[in-house]
Image: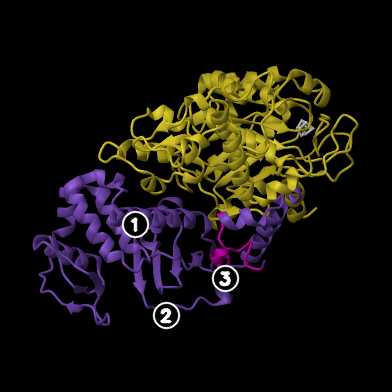
Chain colours: A yellow, B purple
């Protein structure tokens, strides 16, 4: 098998992992450096950022997770890279500025420890034989011995283990060889040992969206639990793509991308906007409205808290207003100390006025007659606005 | 401050521009515009060449009085492709004197807001180029890249590659402005107008294989069920594709 064929197979099997970020590390050395803010080197045909050489070490696997292309029961071409091959490609791509570094994951060959050793051997060689100091994100294999987790963690910038499904029931059904304990054991280990020499860019994880019956509430509750307990940098959400036919799996023609997007938006609200899961989802309404982003939905459900006065409300309140992001909230907060702000100043601060205008006053004034401040009217306008801007979403929505 | 209908001329260099602005500010003049010498006079204004003594201390003075953040800001504007960049720098300095670093939140003032947007635009393009620049390996092991950025980001970009490729010799060519930057493992040197011919047979033997592997990776990594051209183009504007190996032939 040629190197090119291997690369084709092992990139193809790795592509479903959503994580590609290269941020959060300041490593420097002889060959390369990691930029704190992360750098995108290209964008794939699906519009996702390419920052790292994202590959599996091998797609051979002893497990049989239902949703996975590499599961044991699939009759597909299998390949395995040698450590030298991975080093050669990584270094040559890096020098030419194709990539920021390596994302190395793997199917489980023989055992968790055996696979971990292969990963370690490869990355050890990159770091110590070739003095590579670019970014490396490695997957830790659940179930591997702690001393191997420690060894791998001391070589990489980021280490992660994928949760995959938000509930134990989901895992039992679709990934019978896995359990959430082994993943969380790795997370706990990383959290306790994180230093500037051990997983300096922190850990992340991923959940698959739409392969099992979990609601958005299940998923977001899990994320929130992980952020709080393991100091995760990111949770990634990956719309399920029907790679396998199985009676246990939904037969999706099109991946649930709108739902995935809503989860990312909500995840953002948890991390940067001081929202709690209970602010945006409930047992009565466990799934997001596909027609509206979670922040608009929140505001519509809490009209009694709005409109907020731009010139006097707290920073935390600014963050709660649809159409105002963290950057624009900061700008407003700094500017209004010098001048009173009016509607026409807000676009200069980066505010999306078309959305924000419904939920704010400027120097006491609402942008239109107050009698329009009613849920039905606002909802109608916001839904139109949201869906005019993304025709792609509308196409998908019409399928539901 | 008095507004005059004059266009003031400078020689195109950053230092000369700053010296000129310093004189204008001292004499309380708000110019109609500031342009490079050779600018054609129009009906509504007259061109003025002020006598300025080049003051070598001007940059240290600005950094000392206003701080490096403001200095970097105006340097970014200077590197931009904005038609009125000189005037934007003038206003940025004018308001910086009064507001110091607070000028960065002075978006309510239109001229400052424009300047801030330009600073962000140049910074963004510089950041994008850190990712989009593509090197080829030449036979003598030098890494060579060509690009044509909208703003003149090469002077900023070299700082990044000095760290990233510090043990490699490299050469970057801005095709639009005909400027070269060469790094010899210690320093970066700039030339403009130079005629260097990189011939095809100077490219190393490995190059084709690596480009091929990269193309394979690129074509594989996109998920076809998620295909989204518009999103790709938003992040990676078409104007850069000519220089980006994996998409130049799409
Ligand atoms: S362990 Fe990983 S590679 Fe193996 S089948 Fe499960 S998800 Fe796929």
Name the residue that disc number 2 marks.
B195
Chain identifier of the residue bearing label 3 in the image: B
- The answer to whether residue A233 shows anywhere in this view is no
Magenta stretch containing residue B185, yes or no?
A: no
Q: Residue at x 52, y 18 (%)?
A: A192
Height in image: B144 above or below A33? below
Marks 1 and 3: in contact by CB < 8 Å? no
Marks 1 and 2: in contact by CB < 8 Å? no
Quadrant of ligand 1 in image: top right
Say whether residue B93 is left or right of residue A242: left
Say whether residue A274 is left or right of residue A377: left
Name the residue that disc number 1 marks.
B114
Chain identifier of the residue bearing label 2 in the image: B
In primary-sequence order, the first of circles 3 and 2 is: 2
| Mark toward the viewer: 3 or 2 | 2
B59 and A351: which is toward the camera: A351
Name the residue that disc number 3 marks.
B203
SS at badge 2: loop
Where the C terminus of chain B falls, by quadrant? Answer: bottom right
Q: Which residues are magenta?
A: B235-249
Tell me residue B79's x, y (percent): 34, 63
| Mark toward the viewer: 2 or 1 | 1
Where the N terminus of chain B falls, by quadrant? Answer: bottom left
The residues bearing labels 3 and 1 have C-alpha atoms spaced at a distance of 43 Å
């Amino acid at each position: 098998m040629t190197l090119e064929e291997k690369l084709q197979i092992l990139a193809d099997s790795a592509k479903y992992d959503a994580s590609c970020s290269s941020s959060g590390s300041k490593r420097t050395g002889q060959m390369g450096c990691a930029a704190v803010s992360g750098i995108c080197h290209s964008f794939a045909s699906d519009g996702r950022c390419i920052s790292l050489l994202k590959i599996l070490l091998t797609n051979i696997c002893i497990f049989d997770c239902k949703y996975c292309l590499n599961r044991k029961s699939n009759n597909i071409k299998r390949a395995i890279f040698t450590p030298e091959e991975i080093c050669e490609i990584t270094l040559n791509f890096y020098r030419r500025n194709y990539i920021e570094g390596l994302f190395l994951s793997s199917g489980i060959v023989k055992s968790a420890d055996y696979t971990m050793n292969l990963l370690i051997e490869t990355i050890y060689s990159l770091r110590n034989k070739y003095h590579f100091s670019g970014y490396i994100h490695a997957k830790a294999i659940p179930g591997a011995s702690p001393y191997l987790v420690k060894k791998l963690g001391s070589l990489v910038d980021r280490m992660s283990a994928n949760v995959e499904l938000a509930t134990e029931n989901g895992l039992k059904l679709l990934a019978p060889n896995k359990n959430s304990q082994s993943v969380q054991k790795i997370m706990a280990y990383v959290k306790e040992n994180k230093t500037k020499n051990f997983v300096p860019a922190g850990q992340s994880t991923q959940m698959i969206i739409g392969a099992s019956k979990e609601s958005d509430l299940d998923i977001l509750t899990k994320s929130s639990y992980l952020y709080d307990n393991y100091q995760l940098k990111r949770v990634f959400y990956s719309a399920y793509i029907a790679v396998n036919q199985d009676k246990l799996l939904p037969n999706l023609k099109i991946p649930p991308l709108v739902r995935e997007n809503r989860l990312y938006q909500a995840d953002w609200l948890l991390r940067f906007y001081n929202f709690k899961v209970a602010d945006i989802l409930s047992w009565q309404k466990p799934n997001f409205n596909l027609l509206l982003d979670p922040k608009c939905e929140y505001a519509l459900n809490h009209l009694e808290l709005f409109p907020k006065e731009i010139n006097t409300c707290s920073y935390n309140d600014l963050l709660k207003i649809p159409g105002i992001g963290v950057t624009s909230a900061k700008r407003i907060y700094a500017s209004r100390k010098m001048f009173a702000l009016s509607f026409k100043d807000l676009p200069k601060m980066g505010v999306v006025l078309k959305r924000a205008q419904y939920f704010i006053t400027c120097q006491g004034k609402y942008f239109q007659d107050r009698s329009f401040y009613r849920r039905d009217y606002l909802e109608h306008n916001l839904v139109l606005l949201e869906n005019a801007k993304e025709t792609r979403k509308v196409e998908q929505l019409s399928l539901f | 401050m008095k507004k005059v209908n004059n266009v003031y001329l400078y020689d195109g260099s950053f230092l000369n521009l700053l010296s000129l602005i310093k004189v204008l500010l001292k004499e309380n003049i708000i110019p109609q515009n500031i342009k490079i010498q050779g600018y054609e006079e129009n009906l509504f204004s007259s061109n003025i060449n002020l006598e300025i003594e080049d003051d070598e201390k001007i940059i240290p003075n600005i950094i000392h009085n206003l701080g490096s953040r403001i200095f970097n800001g105006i340097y970014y504007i200077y590197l931009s492709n904005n038609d009125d960049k000189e005037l934007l720098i003038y206003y940025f300095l004018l308001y910086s004197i009064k507001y110091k670093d607070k000028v960065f939140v002075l978006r309510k003032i239109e001229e400052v807001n424009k300047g801030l947007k330009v600073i962000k635009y140049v910074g963004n393009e510089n950041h994008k180029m850190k990712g989009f620049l593509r090197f080829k390996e030449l036979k003598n092991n030098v890494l060579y890249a060509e690009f044509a950025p909208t703003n003149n980001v090469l002077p900023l970009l070299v700082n990044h590659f000095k760290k990233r490729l510090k043990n490699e010799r490299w050469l970057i060519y801005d095709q639009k402005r005909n400027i070269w930057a060469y790094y010899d493992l210690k320093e970066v040197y700039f030339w403009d107008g130079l005629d260097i011919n990189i011939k095809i047979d100077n490219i190393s033997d490995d190059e084709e294989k690596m480009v091929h592997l990269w193309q394979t990776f690129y074509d594989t990594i996109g998920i076809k069920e998620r295909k989204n051209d518009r999103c790709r183009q938003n992040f990676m504007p078409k104007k850069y594709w000519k220089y980006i190996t994996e998409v130049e032939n799409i």
